[in-house]
Amino acid sequence: MSTVQSRKAIATGAIGNILEWYDFAIFGYFATSIGRVFFPKADPVAQVLMAFGIFAIGFLMRPLGGVAFGYIGDRVSRQTALTVSIVSMAIPTFLVGIMPGYDTIGLAAPILLTLCRMIQGLSVGGEYTTSLVYMIEQSPKNQRGFVGAMGFSSAVTGMLLGSGVGAALGAVLSPEQLSAWGWRIPFVFGLVIGLAGYLLRRESAEHSHHAPVATVNPVVETFKNHRMVVAKIAGLSVFITVSFNLMFVYVVSWLELVDNIPPSKSLKINTVSMIVLVLATLASGAISDRVGRKPVLTTALIMAIIFSIPLLYGMYHQSDSVIQLSQISFALVIGLFSGTLPTLMVETAPADVRTTAVALGYNLTTGIIGGTTPLVASWLITRTENEILPAYLIMAAAAVSLMTALFVSETHKKDVRFV
């Protein structure tokens, strides 16, 4: 593959990832407003809990999506899997934006919302990991860490776009307007960017002639001979799943409920921190190409264990500047890890079942743990009245991933078969 073709393949994976994760992320950012619209009138905490419960259902569908799209990616082509996934995201996102609320259609509102989230969860379960495999397989050997970091950064950029749109709406609309109807605008806009992503990926698929990698059923082969690979990927993914969903998804609602910060301000704080996260992720990936994946990854996990409590105390503060600096510090630690993990996962998996194995390992963790993390955090804080509990969840997740890393081999010099 020429340099131009390689860059085009990487750009296709990254840009499509941005569009897909914008669609998925805006639900988390507007969970408070969604709770008010789609659920029976109750106290605000109960509505947020119900909204994040639906958020969790979307995550729980991800392992199934990983299996389905992993099979397509290994047996048909990576490009076909990516094209189908973005359509599966854009349509239900648009439907959420135009769907009547509980006051209009009653119980049908939360039921239809749940169905849309289930379809989105299936799509994201195949999107992120398939795009990582596709991008890293096409990249030069000495730049795989940086390209993998681009994959994660593109997902963060999509979420950053959602956060930025939310902050912009908060700046031009009153809190009442944003809560009543303004939150729908990003969902409707998701259809436009979803269509753009579909056209981009369809063109890539039409001009690619990659043969299927797997000659046997990749799902059966993975469960039969590569269970340990899946287990390692799942264990490594625990930290990024818990820390990211707490610090960059749940934190918007956390700041509203705990610090009484209005949505527009909390989204602005989150947007700034996510920009730092993107930069830290890219730097981490580049460093891992030089020194190896494990040293960078383990350093991040040790830092998370040491600094999570003091940094979260910093976010539980009256000063906006202290809150911002504390979340930026979290972004640096998480970015150090997230820039290294994507390529390590892909390099660890065998080529013939790579899409399936990475999708299963990563999505088992994100589906079971990631989706329920905001729900568990909300419930625990409500029950215990301890606003610092998210720090303990992050520390526990870091400990699990650190123990898993002890059993993972260094991979940055390993040859990855291109397909």
Image (cartoon, rainbow, N blue to C red):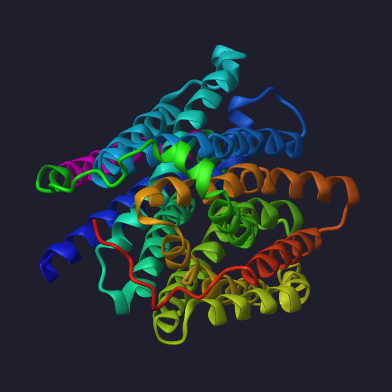
Q: Is residue 44 left or right of residue 75?
A: right
Report the predominant secondary structure element of the magenta stretch.
helix
Give the number of callouts: 0
Q: Is residue 210 left or right of residue 72?
A: left
Asked whether residue 182 appears in the rendered view, the answer is no
- Image-based side of 63 in relation to 380, left or right: left
Magenta stretch bounds: 181-202
Q: Position of residue 263 (x, y in %)?
A: 59, 52
Figure check: 76 above or below 10: above
Quadrant of the image containing the C terminus: bottom left
Q: For the N terminus, give its image quadrant.
A: bottom left
Up the image or down, 418 lies above or below 292; here it is above
Task: State the residue at coordinates (41%, 86%).
Answer: 290
Magenta run includes residue 278: no
Q: Say if residue 193 shows up in the picture.
A: yes
Is residue 191 one of those drawn in magenta?
yes
| Position of residue 362 measured from the top left corner of the image (x, y, whole percent) | 53, 51
Query: At 55% from the left edge and 57% from the top edge, which residue is drawn?
Result: 233
Residue 75's place in the image compared with 297, above or below, is above
Task: Name which quarter of the figure residue 411 lies in.
Answer: bottom left
Q: Position of residue 190 (x, y in %)?
A: 35, 40
Q: Nearer the viewer, residue 227 or 396?
A: 227
Report the front residue among 138 and 307.
Answer: 138
Residue 253, image x and y in percent?
65, 50
Please state if 40 lies on the left or on the right of 248 as rendered.
Answer: right
Residue lying at the far bottom of the rendered structure? 291
